[in-house]
Image (tube, rainbow, N blue to C red):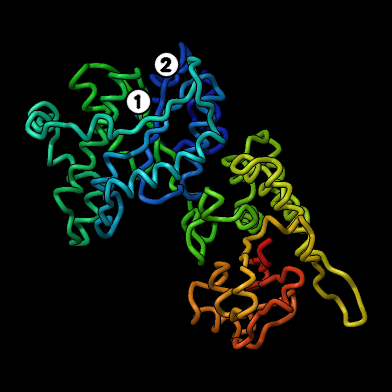
Amino acid sequence: MTYHPKSDFMRVMIERGFLADCTDYQGLDEALSKGVVPGYIGFDATAKSLHVGSLIQIMMLRWLQKTGHRPITLMGGGTTKVGDPSFRADERPLLTPAQIDDNIAGIKQVFAKYVSYDDSPTGALMLNNAEWLDDLNYLDFLRDIGRHFSVNRMLSFESVKSRLDREQSLSFLEFNYMILQAYDFLELHRRYGCLLQMGGSDQWGNIVNGIDLTRRVVDHGIFGLTSPLLTTSDGKKMGKTADGAVWLNADMCSVFDFWQFWRNTTDADVGRFLRLYTELPVAECEQMGRLGGSEINEAKVILANEVTALCHGQTAAASAANAAGQIFSFKLDADGITAQSDVSSPELDVLPTVRLSAEEATAGVSIVQLFVRSGLAKSGKDAKRLIAENGAKLDDAPLTDAGLVIDAAMLAQPIKLSAGRKRHALVRLNG
């Protein structure tokens, strides 16, 4: 990137690695330099939480506000009913309106931690595109909006072309998604003076459509900016692990597991992730990214602390870090080096916890069932395989008996379950 920006926002986007492409670098930069620019990112409500893969977009909205502009978080209450086909091999399952509303309620929880919603000129707006999409008259929409779209051009977009090239079906319902997203930009511009749409680079075609539609309908210049689609240095999709997505809501991914995800960042990704996901100075991020040996592990702890504090608060981040210190501390005894963690320590309360009723404890619960209920195994079969392959531990001791039953006598104090070296949970009695 050789462009030298005047505005703080563009400077941050370029220096910290957020920028993949922009429809008009100079035009957007000048608009940002002249006054408050409202900018939006849309989030479809396909789950009850966003995951780490969306965090780069959330940080872009945060930086937009921090540099003096107005972020708009647009919930896709309308577009989720259609489903974005971008770079998907198949059609998304259709959700009911009730499921979509439930998902939106879950997703909204995270945004207030990153941007401030208030009535100031830079106060963030929380909107839902169902407001203007749900009551559209189909014939009027086709006549007034549909006539501005070229099917030939829409077929040329990579997100659609890649699907058709693989001879995979693309429904007419999905094909309408890009028209609806373009219409979102037009409506946001009309209603709120929105000048900028941001998104991942897979949204480039949809963003360009919105800019073109707005120019045709109201003859105003607006802008698009995309971030790179991140993968880790080993080629994995950002936010995905062998155990599934790393969610941003604590009720879907514990604070400890969230913290641990960042602590386990590969060495090659540390500097880049510090620039993208924290607010530490760029020079400091780059310096830590160049560290090696045990020092890079200290940088990973800083990364985990900073990202977790933004998402879950300073107190939760400190608790997760202290819990990790408890779990991964060691002592030297007559048997050599053995793991040492006090499961009664309040520091470990941040771990995923299975709470058993007195009735359950009296009857006894199988260890296999507890591994499933704690989220350390996906199924009973998975739990048994983990135990058979010596990957399971009970209070830091190898667990070899898949038939073990945990009863009230064993729960005089909490017990700790471990799957491998990095995933842990507690089991304790209620009350």
Q: Give the camera-side residue of 171 and 412.
A: 412
* Res 180 → quadrant: top left
* Res 284 → quadrant: top right
Residue 153 image point, x, y percent: 17, 39
Residue 5 image point, x, y percent: 51, 22
| 239 horizontally vs 93: left or right | right
**Under tag 2, what secondary structure?**
helix
Is any part of residue 243 visible from this angle? yes
Tell me what residue is drawn at x 37 percent, y 30 percent. 127
For marks 1 and 2, give the CA distance: 10 Å
Residue 305 position (above or below residue 186): below
Q: The disc labelled 1 sits on which kind of residue?
A: Phe
Residue occupied by mark 1 = 223
Q: Residues within 10 Å of mark 1 (few under 14, many from 20)?
A: many
Q: The disc labelled 2 sits on which kind of residue?
A: Ala
Tell me what residue is drawn at x 59 percent, y 45 percent. 272
Marker count (numbered): 2
| 253 horizontally vs 35: left or right | right
Q: Residues within 10 Å of mark 2 (few under 14, many from 20)?
A: some
Residue occupied by mark 2 = 31
Residue 413 position (above or below residue 219): below
Tell me what residue is drawn at x 46 percent, y 22 percent. 70
Q: Earlier in the sequence, mark 1 or mark 2?
A: 2
Residue 431 image point, x, y percent: 69, 61
Q: Give the camera-side residue of 13 and 52.
A: 52
Residue 150 position (above or below residue 46): above
